[in-house]
Image (cartoon, rainbow, N blue to C red):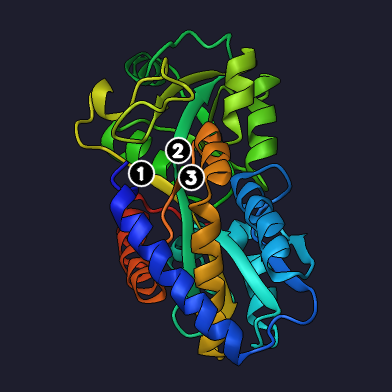
């Protein structure tokens, strides 16, 4: 993926290591457990990333990392709680692209993405997966679109405002011009199970949690939104090669701290998490799930958030997607 450049990541990690060493010498942080509000339910991509990073972070910092899952409402529940946390580095937020989308999707998401948080690091990105129940008579994206022109389809996503939801609006509604109905779930897990049990025909979530169900045959992968096929599911074609050249969408998973958190602690966390996602065993584990590490620095992630807010605001305006 374009997000993973080995030399760039190595340079960032090396610089992060130097920064972390300097911060350790100046601050005894942390000296108590750290709470991470996760904007998704257990088993979803946010939860997966929070726990993979949290396990290693606990080892490196010598303190417990408590993952507090608060899924639903496009991640705004967890985000609102985190925004009220004391800005001392002991309350963090782990959220996805929905953090940026909620600013336009909700009249009042309950937080300002620029004012209320300090972006720490974009830990990784994953493409989104379009999948169907095995009984659906479509083996690829073009066949699914043809089916959608013959009958009205509904698709489930990991939540209103999630990137998979907006991918459905952008790709299926705006580009393929299908009259589709969106059914939001609280996270990826119930959306996948709804498709696997034939409650709904089509699902759209980030790729990581779909891998086991696709491999077991409980759902069928139709298309992935990365520019190239994913090594863990090479049989699933990309959206770009199935009639939409250049198309790509990602779900990113990042960490945030409440505004006012000391800069030195933010930089320490950035350095540690950047180092974690560059560890060979972590990279391997994330790759199997469909994640690609990013590990950008604080200014880079801050700029990226602004780009994402603008990008998804346009998709939401053009598609008319609203949740309130």
Specify which label sits upstream in the sequence, 1 or 2: 2
Percent from the top left, x then y, of residue 238? 33, 26
Q: CA distance from mark 3 to mark 2?
A: 10 Å
**Element carrying mark 2:** strand
Which residue is tagged 3? 165
Q: Is residue 89 left or right of residue 259?
A: right
Rendered image quadrant of residue 83 = bottom right
Quarter of the image for the C terminus: give it.
Answer: bottom right
Q: CA distance from mark 1 to mark 2?
A: 7 Å
Q: Nearer the viewer, residue 260 or 247?
A: 260
Percent from the top left, x then y, of residue 96? 52, 57
Percent from the top left, x then y, of residue 157? 56, 40
User: Callout 1: 10 Å neighbours few (<14), some, many (20+)?
Assistant: many
Q: Nearer the viewer, residue 241 or 76?
A: 241
Which residue is tagged 2? 128
Specify which label sits upstream in the sequence, 3 or 2: 2
Q: Is residue 90 at all visible to an observer of this figure?
A: yes
Which residue is tagged 1? 249
Identity of the residue drawn at 51% across and 60% down? 275
Q: Is residue 153 at all visible to an observer of this figure?
A: no
């Amino acid at each position: 993926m374009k997000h993973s450049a080995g030399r760039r990541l190595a340079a960032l990690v090396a610089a992060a290591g130097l920064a972390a060493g300097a911060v350790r010498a100046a601050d005894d942080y942390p000296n108590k457990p750290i709470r991470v509000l996760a904007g998704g339910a257990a088993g979803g991509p946010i939860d997966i990333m929070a726990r993979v990073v949290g396990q290693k972070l606990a080892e490196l910092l010598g303190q417990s990392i408590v993952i507090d899952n608060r899924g639903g409402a496009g991640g705004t529940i967890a985000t609102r709680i985190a925004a009220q946390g004391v800005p001392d580095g002991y309350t963090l937020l782990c959220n996805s692209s929905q953090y940026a989308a909620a600013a336009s999707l909700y009249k009042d998401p309950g937080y300002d993405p620029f004012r209320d948080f300090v972006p720490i690091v974009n830990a990784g990105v994953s493409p989104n997966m379009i999948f169907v129940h095995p009984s659906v008579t479509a083996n690829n994206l073009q066949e699914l679109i043809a089916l959608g022109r013959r009958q009205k389809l509904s698709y489930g996503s990991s939540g209103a405002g999630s990137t998979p939801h907006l991918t459905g609006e952008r790709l299926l509604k705006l580009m393929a011009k299908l009259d589709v109905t969106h059914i939001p779930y609280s996270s990826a897990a119930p959306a996948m199970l709804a498709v696997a049990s034939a409650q709904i025909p089509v699902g759209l979530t980030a790729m990581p949690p779909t891998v086991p169900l696709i491999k077991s045959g409980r759902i069928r992968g139709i298309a992935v939104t990365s520019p190239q096929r994913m090594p863990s599911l090479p049989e699933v074609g990309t959206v770009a090669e199935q009639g939409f050249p250049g198309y790509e969408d990602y779900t990113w998973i990042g960490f945030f701290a409440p505004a006012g958190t000391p800069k030195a602690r933010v930089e320490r966390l950035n350095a540690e998490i950047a180092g974690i996602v560059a560890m060979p065993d972590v990279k391997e584990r994330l790759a199997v799930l469909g994640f690609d590490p990013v590990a950008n620095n604080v200014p880079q992630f801050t700029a990226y958030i602004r780009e994402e807010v603008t990008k998804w605001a346009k998709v939401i305006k053009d598609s008319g997607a609203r949740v309130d």
